[in-house]
Image: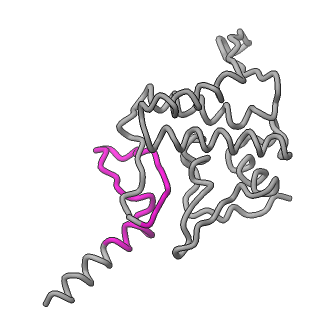
Amino acid sequence: MTAIDPRPLTGEPVSLDLLNTRWNDEGVRRDLLTDVEGLAVWLGANGLTERFTADAATLRHTLAARDALAALVERPGDPDATARVDAVLDHGRIRATLTADGPGEVAEFADPARGPGWTAARDYLDLLRTAPDRIRACAHEACILHFFDTSRNGTRRWCSMAICGNRAKASRHYARTKEN
């Protein structure tokens, strides 16, 4: 039985969900990926438990992928950050297939422990290819979470309107009442 996912934001594309394994909780930095149990939670949240095992090697490679993605998100276009993501992507490939349902693709890895990190890096490429302007960091100054803006007009600012959006509204209200 897998533990409950404690993160405040889940359900984002797998690349951003990997970044969101670190978050702030009342000013305290939390990290889901401190052990293989946390990795098992993350794998389960992303439907990856049938293909990958939560073990020390997979955790090590997934952390390396998370760090590479974080560097690229913080410094888009930076050659070092780009090279780090490319290094993650070097450990997998897509094989074209033909199935009864038609054309398909299968990801292949020489080392399955690299699969979850590769899957996240590949997903990030897909997000960059389809809508790079919709990859966002939460606008709240204390939040470190990321999301893919699926709002119709593309103006989402908060990881969660109920949490960070509400905090911002409360802060603005407090500032207005304090001025009066």
Q: Position of residue 53 (x, y in %)?
A: 84, 41
Residue at 65% over, 60% down? 31
* Membership of 53 in magenta stretch: no
Question: Which region of the structure is painted magenta?
Answer: 142-168
Q: Position of residue 50 (x, y in %)?
A: 82, 38
Q: Which of 46 and 111 is in front in this view?
A: 111
Q: Locate residue 178 relative to residue 61 in the image: left or right.
A: left
Q: Where is residue 149 in the image (x, y as percent from the top left)?
A: 40, 46
Place residue 106 in its image quadrant.
top right
Q: Locate residue 148 relative to residue 68 in the image: left or right.
A: left
Q: Nearer the viewer, residue 77 or 24?
A: 77
Place residue 177 in its image quadrant.
bottom left
Looking at this rendering, what residue extends furthest in the front direction? 80
Q: Position of residue 166 (x, y in %)?
A: 37, 72
* 91 up-or-down from 100: above or below: below
Looking at this rendering, what residue extends furthest in the left direction? 180
Place residue 33 in its image quadrant.
bottom right
Residue at 47% over, 49% down? 147
* 76 up-or-down from 33: above or below: above
Q: How many labels does the image show?
A: 0
Q: Quarter holding the C terminus?
A: bottom left
Q: Nearer the viewer, residue 77 or 97?
A: 77
Q: Locate residue 56 relative to residue 155 in the image: left or right.
A: right
* 97 up-or-down from 90: above or below: above
Q: Quarter holding the N terminus?
A: bottom right
Residue at 36% over, 58% down? 139
Residue at 58% over, 67% down? 29
Q: Coloring scheme of the render? A: one colour
* Membership of 151 in magenta stretch: yes
